Image (cartoon, helix red, strand yellow):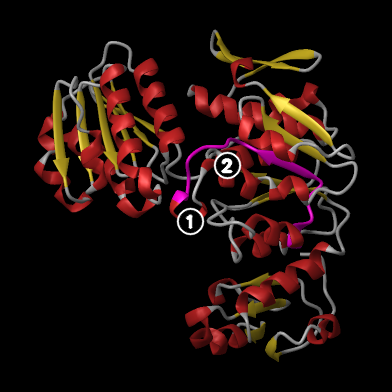
Amino acid sequence: MIPVAWDEVAALELGALEGGGTITGITADSRLAGPGDLFVALNSGVAYVGEARARGASTLVPDDQHAALAALASLVRGKSPARIVAVVGSTGKTSTKDILGALCAAVTPTVWADASQNNEIGLPLTVCRLEVETRVLVTEMGMRGLGQVGDLCAIARPHVAVVTSIGPEHLELVGSIENVARANAEAIAALPPGGVAVVPADAPQLEPFLGRTDIEIRRFDRSAANLDGGAWRFALPGRDLVLELPFRSRHMAENALAALTAYDALGLPLGRAQEGASRIVLSRWRGEETSLPGGGMVVNDAYNANPTSMHAALVDLAERAGGRRRVAILGEMAELGDDADRYHREIGALVARIGIHVLVAVGENARGYLQPGVDEMHWIPNVEAFDTVVGVLRPGDAVLVKGSRAVGLEGIPARIEKLGRTWFAS
């Protein structure tokens, strides 16, 4: 972290502060605290203040933990010359962030958010990882209501805003897709003059928020990502670019196109993009693919789900399954408000239309997935009941596991892998 003087931290008057000396790291995990670090005790972390002090760290028990983290991050941010990117949107935020971080890191000192550190705790802790030499910081900003992205932007103060997509998410909280667009567009409103907004060409809900004449608007066209042999061909303004990527999913390639557009907006050399592409590592449970004995596969995309991401994952399964039997294990989609039943039924109709052979629906709202046209359908109330339907799986199946985070499907692929080993055990 960029060093911060003790007096600067003390002057913020954030709570009970103990220790001294220059602060060279900020953490909320006492196990990671050491000399030079400031351990910020969040929630039950107060019980670990003594442990952090024993490890040689300074400590802060904040009066208001969110305000304290915001103030500390703003202090560090103010000392950095780095170009800051805010990645927002309804789907694909984390993967786009991971791809962009890897692309940038190959050519310039870059920091990017871990996993989904995209809220009022994770975002400030990410900003606090800025080093003196950092030239690009890629942040991710989640949204569960109007004003939240704007608050996070006030901390990070981005130069580039990437909107990955606009679709139905958190409708129980924001009420409409138009408000989803409004909430994510707060990142565009936060840009300084000369900033760049990277937006999808197929998001008309964003148009009312793209009228600024003091920033640049760059649109990416999802159809401009095409599989060309074993690599992806991207049509960018003024040139085509062919990259080997560690995935074959179209929706991941679309995330890569958004990342490439932002990479170009940062003025980084497209001619060196393959160096970064070779380093891409996606966060857990986002399209993780594992081969199964007998030529099968299981895709763990269980981190979260909304209608847009569910549609993309199902179409990807249908496209890549080939002649294999297609099995979809789908958890319900949360926070869709009054239209939840309609959205679940629409996904159920898609399941039938694209030729999924076996559907396992998990959760009360997931009953809506059970639409005519699927060879075999099962409903279970929760993930604990999965063992009652595991017998539907066969060697050689292509399996997708996806649902909202609250359903907790992320452990299912490991159980399927274990089952696959028993099929061919000697």
- How many numbered circles are shown? 2
Q: Where's residue 321, x and y in %?
A: 33, 17
Q: Residue furthest top?
A: 229
- Give the residue at mark 1: 173
SS at badge 1: helix
Check the picture and name the quadrant holding the N terminus: bottom right
Q: Is residue 232 or residue 118 the one in the foreground?
A: 118
Residue range highlighted in magenta: 155-171
Regarding mark 2 in the picture, which secondary structure is present there? Answer: helix
Q: Nearer the viewer, residue 67 or 2?
A: 67
User: x, y percentage for residue 259?
Assistant: 67, 33
Where is residue 323 shown, x and y percent of the image? Answer: 27, 11
| Earlier residue among tags 1 and 2 | 1
Can residue 103 be seen here? The reply is: no
User: Which corner quadrant of the image does residue 15 belong to?
Assistant: bottom right
- Which amino acid lies under the numbered mark 2 shown in the image of this protein? Glu
Q: Amino acid at mark 1?
A: Leu
Residue 178 marker: 2
Give the left or right position of residue 209, taking residue 216 as reference.
left
Q: Is residue 218 magenta?
A: no
How far apart are the two marked residues, 1 and 2, measured between alpha carbons? 13 Å
